[in-house]
Image: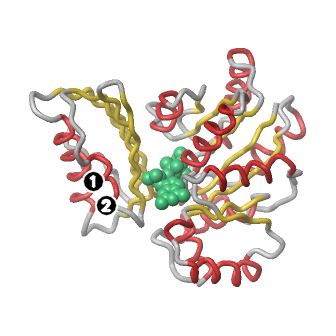
Amino acid sequence: MELHLVSGFLGSGKTTSIITLCKHLMQKGKKVAVVTNDQGKYLVDTAFFRASDIPATEVQSGCFCSNYQDLVEQLDELCVRVGPDVVFAESIGSAGNLVGTVLQPLLNTSKYTPSSLSAIVDARLFLRLLHDEPLPFSDSVSATFRSQLNESDLLIINKIDLLSSDDIKEIKFKINEHFPDKKYLFQSAFSTSDIQNWYNNIRVLKVSEMKDSGLNSQLHQRALLRLKWMERVYDLKSKNNVFDEIHNIIDTMLKRLSGTPRAIAHIKAYIEYNGKYLKIGITSLNENDWQDQLHDLFAHSAKVIINARIHSDDDIDDLFIL
Ligand SMILES: Nc1nc2c(ncn2[C@@H]2O[C@H](COP(=O)(O)OP(=O)(O)OP(=O)(O)O)[C@@H](O)[C@H]2O)c(=O)[nH]1
Ligand SMILES: [Mg+2]
């Protein structure tokens, strides 16, 4: 069984990339499965994988790093239930030091030998990093963002559909200065040919357990304290259009955030309605795409899961209207 670890900051495109790749592999007759990982109990990513007919188990309530045994148990469970050819383990977007806490123990002590560790990065944030421009996060969170790139074997510069060709040239020009000898690929997570290229690379990669994330653990603890988590599950019913209510819930959150020192790391929602489903994501750099996704949808009832990761010094309970 191939096991591929996929890290990368909140909202960088891990789930989207894995879904595109799983669909491609399933079409080729491969059995695939996923282990998701997030902070709470009602995980948007797990719901989205399962709705996409991809077998998924989850490590809840914190990083793989602090739940290593649970990760191994979830892999055991997938082996028995699915017997997969390929498994992707998507780490929480705030993970730090995956090499020391997950990759090395897997290599040294477990029957599951990881084949690769890819870090996925939003190309627009990556360009800012290469230009030494500030990221829209505090220093501790920015250090976590950077450390994930340091410790990966392969850097996936994602969302290039949102960059100009000059920006891509600029990244190629600057990358060696900041990440000497790092293997990297450009991709859009929606492009099957880009994603096939990622898979062709991770299949032949040899993992190295020596990469140092360079992350100071106190700094990482500070980042975790700052990245507040909130989850909600709604069973919504309406005589009119339930999407008006969903729009109102998200819009209210964003209005309550705007003008405050808080910043969005990733707000994601899974919505199931009329036998269909969709997932929306709101990151620090694109706050408005979600409205387009909800446009023209109609249903009288929907199940909605919302996971929010917000950069904030205080609690974020007040963001939700219900
Ligand atoms: N334009 C564009 N958008 C993308 C791409 N990949 C992902 N997205 C969008 O970015 C948002 C976040 O994507 P996810 O795949 O949920 O990100 P993630 O890394 O799994 O997020 P977490 O699990 O919360 O850390 C979603 O709105 C996606 O549709 C891409 O290649 N291009
Ligand atoms: Mg995800």
Are circles 1 and 2 on residues that touch, CB within 8 Å? yes
Looking at the image, which residue is at 32% across and 33% down? 304
Quadrant of the snapshot with the N terminus: top right
Q: How many marks?
A: 2
Residue 62 found in image quarter = top right
Q: Is residue 175 left or right of residue 168?
A: right
Disc 1 residue type? Answer: Gln
Q: Position of residue 297 (x, y in %)?
A: 24, 40
Q: Colour scheme in the image?
A: secondary structure
Residue 272 found in image quarter = top left
For numbered disc 2, what is the local secondary structure? loop
Looking at the image, which residue is at 42% across and 46% down? 229
Q: Residues within 10 Å of mark 1 (few under 14, many from 20)?
A: few
Q: Position of residue 144 (x, y in %)?
A: 61, 62
Looking at the image, which residue is at 87% across and 54% down? 208
For numbered disc 1, what is the local secondary structure? helix
Question: Mark 1 sits on what residue?
Answer: 291
Q: CA distance from mark 1 to mark 2?
A: 6 Å
Looking at the image, which residue is at 68% across and 63% down? 147
Residue 269 or residue 321, whichever sits in front: 269
Disc 2 residue type? Answer: Asn
Q: Is mark 2 within 8 Å of ligand 1?
A: no
Residue 178 or residue 65, whichever sits in front: 178
Question: Mark 2 sits on what residue?
Answer: 288
Q: Residues within 10 Å of mark 2 (few under 14, many from 20)?
A: few
Residue 106 or residue 224, whichever sits in front: 106
Q: Position of residue 72 (x, y in %)?
A: 74, 29
